[in-house]
Amino acid sequence: MLAGVARRSDGGAPTAVYIESGTKRVFACALDWPGWCRSGKNETQALEALAAAAPRYAVVAAAAGLPFPTSTGDTFDVVERLPGSADTDFGVPRAIASRDTEPLMAREADRLAGLVRASWRVLEQVAAGAPAHLRKGPRGGGRDRDAIVAHVVGAEAAYARKLGIRESPPLPDDLAAITALRAAIVNALATPSDGAAVIEKGWPQRYAARRIAWHVLDHAWEIEDRSDATA
């Protein structure tokens, strides 16, 4: 299940991942599956968390209409290790992998955009089935459902600026504005390119897709985890 280059028992290649290591937290992220990123205190724990999240990510792949065999999370090939930062330790995958800056062809760009769309769909479905008040953390903290969804929407306006899209953060109940912002993000992600950052000090599309989908799914899975018992 952990890092390795041996082929899986089903004949498929191991899943390519990169490791981002801070001083307190380490992320493992699947390069070809934006949003499938998990963290731990060290590389082993991060890879174990990534494997454990494979069934959850399979739901996202299905929503995007993409095959995701049950063995996809069985074996990982760590193709790059990157230094982290204070953001990594805070809990945000911030490093840009070497592959993120390679030319982006139309088919892959469309696939990235489709997986980001699917992550939004999963969040919407999870939120629709969750109670308004979620179980609190061990110290009594944590946002409730609607506040989490509003936080995700607000963050996306900031992420969009990294793709050259300048829109004010939509209000949580302004569905038209949210739809327009997300359509602009999808359009930017789905445009073939040379792989460089879209704007100066912006993000390459692959990293943008990973960061946006990770943030959406991290909170979708948080809602799921904190819905099992409410307070």
Image (cartoon, rainbow, N blue to C red):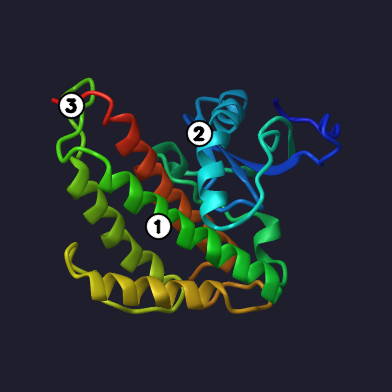
Residue wearing tag 2: 39
Residue wearing tag 1: 120
- Label 1 CA crowd tier, 10 Å (few <14, some 14–19, many 20+): many
Looking at the image, which is closer to me, 215 or 58? 58
Q: Are marks 2 and 1 in contact (CB under 8 Å)?
A: no
Please tell me the numbered disc located at residue 216. Answer: none
Residue type, numbered disc 2 = Ser
Mark closer to the observer (2, 3):
3
Which residue is rendered at x = 32% and y = 68% of the image? 157
Where is residue 132 shown, x and y percent of the image? 16, 41
Q: Are marks 3 and 1 in contact (CB under 8 Å)?
A: no
Residue 215 against residue 53 in the figure, above or below: below
Image-quadrant location for residue 48 = top right
Give the side of residue 184 with respect to residue 6, left or right. Answer: left
Q: Earlier in the sequence, mark 3 or mark 1?
A: 1
Looking at the image, which is closer to me, 21 or 182? 182
Q: Secondary structure at mark 1?
A: helix
Which residue is rendered at x = 53% and y = 55% of the image? 210
Which residue is rendered at x = 19% and y = 62% of the image? 172
Image quadrant where one finds the C terminus: top left
Give the side of residue 14 with respect to residue 142, left or right. Answer: right
Where is residue 113 shown, x and y percent of the image? 54, 67
**Mark 2 and mark 3: Cα distance apart in space:** 25 Å
Residue 159 against residue 124 in the figure, above or below: below
Residue wearing tag 3: 230
Residue type, numbered disc 1 = Trp
Give the side of residue 31 with respect to residue 130, left or right. Answer: right
Residue type, numbered disc 3 = Thr
